[in-house]
Amino acid sequence: MRDIDITENCLNFVDSQGTRVSDKFFQLIEVIGEVKIVHSNFIKKIKNSRFYELRIKAGNEYRIMIFAIDHLNFSECTKAVCLNGFLKKSNKDYVKGIKQAEKILEEYLKSSEL
């Protein structure tokens, strides 16, 4: 139903967090690929941004930045890309995560046009 790409930056982040986070991440990717409407406990729009976050609770709160490629609303998109991840310690972490996601998205879109 929904095609999910995962960038190398995102995979590196997930792999560096250990098996518990990695297992939860891939379970959630499978769910959001199959289910049209995903509960906000897992996917939530980031305010004042074009990105969504995938929330992984495994002791700490991990966030994966997602961009819906073909629609502004995640529930309506058929293609999305997981860009990068970070450990949420404060709301300031979002600013850094969004800036990094924008750079990765720009590279991703350039390479997918080739």
Image: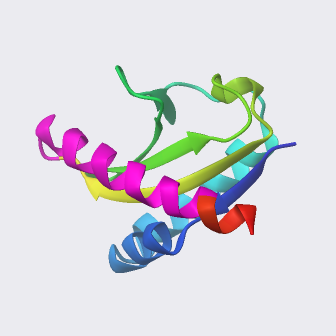
| Residue at the spot 50% in from the left edge and 55% down from the top edge | 106
* Quarter of the rendering occupied by the C terminus: bottom right
Q: Is residue 93 in view from this perspective?
A: yes
Q: Is residue 35 left or right of residue 25?
A: right
From the image, give the main secondary structure of the stretch colored magenta: helix
Q: Position of residue 85 (x, y in %)?
A: 37, 58
Instruction: Relative to 60, say whether 72 is above or below.
Output: above
Seen in the picture, residue 90 relative to 83 is either above or below; the reply is above
Eyeballing the image, is 62 above or below 45? Answer: below
Report the residue that reaches farthest toward the right.
1
Q: Is residue 59 visible?
A: no
> 114 or 38, which lies in front?
114
Which span is picked out in magenta? 89-109
Residue lying at 35% horizontally and 20% vertically, measured from the top left: 47
Magenta region includes residue 102: yes
The part of the image, by quadrant, that contains residue 9 is bottom left
| Figure label count | 0
What sort of colour scheme is used for the picture? rainbow
Query: Which of 48/111 is in front?
Result: 111
Instruction: Tell me the quarter of the picture where residue 16 sits.
Output: bottom left
Residue 65 is situated, as x and y percent measured from the top left of the image, at 44, 47
Image quadrant assignment for residue 84? bottom left
Where is residue 7? Give x, y as percent. Answer: 55, 67
Q: Is residue 28 left or right of residue 43?
A: right
- In which quadrant will I find the N terminus? top right
- Specify whether 28 is left or right of 75: left
Q: Nearer the viewer, residue 65 or 24?
A: 65
Residue lying at 17% horizontally and 45% vertically, measured from the top left: 93
Residue 54: say if magenta.
no
Q: Position of residue 104 (x, y in %)?
A: 45, 60
Residue positioned 29% across, 48% down in the render: 99
